[in-house]
Amino acid sequence: MPEAIFAVMNIQPSQEAPCPSDQTGDLTHPFSVVAPTKQTVPLVFASPHSGQSYPAAFIAASGLDLLTLRRSEDSFVNELFALAPHCGAPLIHALFPRAYLDANREPYELDPGMFEDALPAYANTRSLRVAGGLGTVARVVTDGAEIYTQKMSFAEAEDRIEKLYLPYHRALKQLLDQTVESFGYSILIDCHSMPSVGGPMDEDRGHGRADIVLGDRFGTSCAPALTQCAEMAFTSLGYTVARNNPYAGGYTTDHYGRPIRNIHALQIEINRGIYMDESSLTRSANFNQVVEDMGRVIEALAQIEAVSLRMRR
């Protein structure tokens, strides 16, 4: 990749990066797609948890302050992968926050205890994620604090899903379909961040984590060559890498990853401690270096050949 690209994309947080949160809560547009002038590689990047537009009514209905709500975000992850379009790949990211609606869940993965009326039969009320309070409409933030002070109606949740969740996934599917049509296959990279230490709701609570966790649903969501390529790219840059522990990939990886249909999906979790201050939710001095490193990983992924993915022809 030309060094000039990295120079052009040198982010100065005070000038180019968006505000830490959008308290106007304008969700007229639920997602953003940053597309290259022409897609030249079979990659699609997605960030479902980096949204920062908090509706005022949501904040008012919560018993938590904005900073606490924001701890559920994958803060700045869309910025970490900002070089994707410059490498010829589209980047889609949700603008709605994860605490408001989680795009990395089934569309109706809901906790019946949160609602004042009965849920429809098609709702998934028994998943482990629902049990943990982290369904499509979360009951708690990631540290376990309750979000709402009162129960809501199912109509309110359905409104969020229809206006935000479904459009996001329609757009993501369209990007993947277009990529398959153009290249014969597609590679979805689902981009996330994780706390540097396991929290009270995690199996690894109290333990430090690797710099990068790659999730391929234990080898089912993509060809082994893709995970291996990503791991080698990160380790060559000095990052420590783990696979599928503590995160093996969520709904997006599981739902879209169909190697037999020429769609490969890999989740990348980035340790927040390497690019941000986790207490203040601000970018650290190392932020631009991580952006540059992600660009080099994108470049490495773009070099994967179809034959190494054992494509079906």
Image (cartoon, rainbow, N blue to C red):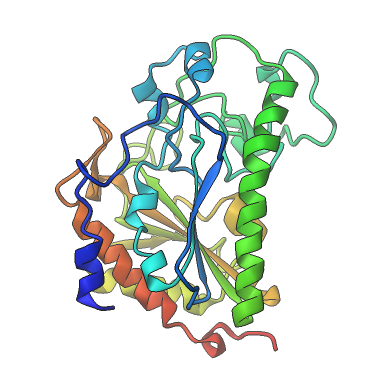
The quarter of the rendered structure image containing the N terminus is bottom left
Q: Residue 213 location in percent, x, y?
A: 39, 57
| In-front residue for pair 107/114 | 107
Work out whether residue 238 can be spotted: no
Report which quarter residue 204 is drawn in: top left
| In-front residue for pair 234/15 | 15
Q: Which residue of the protein is positioned furthest toward the right in this rendering? A: 121
Work out whether residue 24 can be spotted: yes
**Above or below for 84 versus 161:** below
The quarter of the rendered structure image containing the C terminus is bottom right
Q: Residue 64 location in percent, x, y?
A: 42, 16
Residue for point 54% across, 29% down: 100
Report which quarter residue 311 is drawn in: bottom right
Left or right of residue 299, residue 257 in this image: right
Residue for point 34% across, 63% down: 83
Residue for point 36% across, 75% down: 299
| In-front residue for pair 244/87 | 87
Residue for point 49% across, 40% down: 95
Q: Residue 312 location in percent, x, y?
A: 68, 85
**Above or below for 310 versus 200:** below
**Above or below for 137 versus 300:** above
Q: Which residue of the protein is positioned furthest toward the front in this rendering? A: 37
